[in-house]
Amino acid sequence: MTGALPFNADTAAGLAVAAHRGQTEKDGAPYWHHLARVAAAVPPAYRALAWLHDLFEDTSWTCAELLDLGPLPVGLCSDLAILTKPRGALYPDFIVGIVESGSVPALVVKRADVADHLRPGHEAVLTAEKIAVYRDALAVLDLTLEERRVEVAADLLARTAVLAGRWNTATVDESGVARAARAVIGDLMYRDELFGDVSRAGLAGAAGYEAMAVLHSADRERTGA
């Protein structure tokens, strides 16, 4: 082990800039500019992964060499492996692999990566085929992340409501729970699991509030009030 400094986003940024030195984007800009934009587009907890998301694919770095730098964030190497397109693999199959991995960090970073490739002005340097591939990938990633948001929010709503003793999942149909889940989520980004810079306590509070709203709505529908 050559060092024991904390491995964080700043460490990852320095490593990425050095490892990708000499590489450029299709428009001629230094490649690390793309990495910086992707890192800026994700929650703080995922920024080290974002800086390094192309490390294994586009440089000679390996997980073993990363481990030699000191303790790594939990799951960093496995997520980097998920984000590394196998040689010869078709891009749609690569995206399916990321989706099937179930890794929220990998999904969030890849979504930011694809969105940056499609940023305004950059499509001019892409082929029509590549643009179509990226747009399809973005749609798949967006759908997957939205499904995860609704799934987790609905679970929070149900558990919060049951604990409060006010209603249970039998009193509200599935579409009602889904609507309530979407209301809780809004436009939040991810942090830990799925909800950006909102604390778990804050999210639980929001879920509880929305659960009460669903309860009162269901009561009004039953009583005709």
Image (cartoon, rainbow, N blue to C red):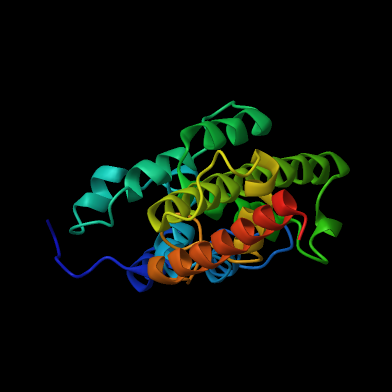
Q: Residue at x 51, y 50 (%)?
A: 167
Nearer to the camera, 23 or 185: 185
Question: Observer-nearest residue: 122 or 118?
Answer: 118
- Answer whether residue 31 is visible to the viewer in this image: no
| Residue 177: % across, % down | 62, 48
Q: Is residue 196 above or below residue 89?
A: below
x and y percentages locating residue 145 in the rendered image: 60, 48
Residue 41 in the image: state x and y as whole percent: 58, 67
Q: Is residue 44 above or below residue 94?
A: below
Which quadrant of the view contains residue 175? top right
* Residue 149 as seen in the image, left or right of residue 223: left
Q: Quadrant of the C terminus?
A: bottom right
Of 181 and 116, nearer the camera is 181
Q: What residue lies at 48% left-to-right and 71% top-to-bottom?
A: 197
Residue 79, by quadrant, is: top left
- The answer to whether any part of residue 157 appears in the image is yes
Quadrant assignment for the N terminus: bottom left
Q: Position of residue 77 (x, y in %)?
A: 33, 46
Left or right of residue 4: residue 205: right
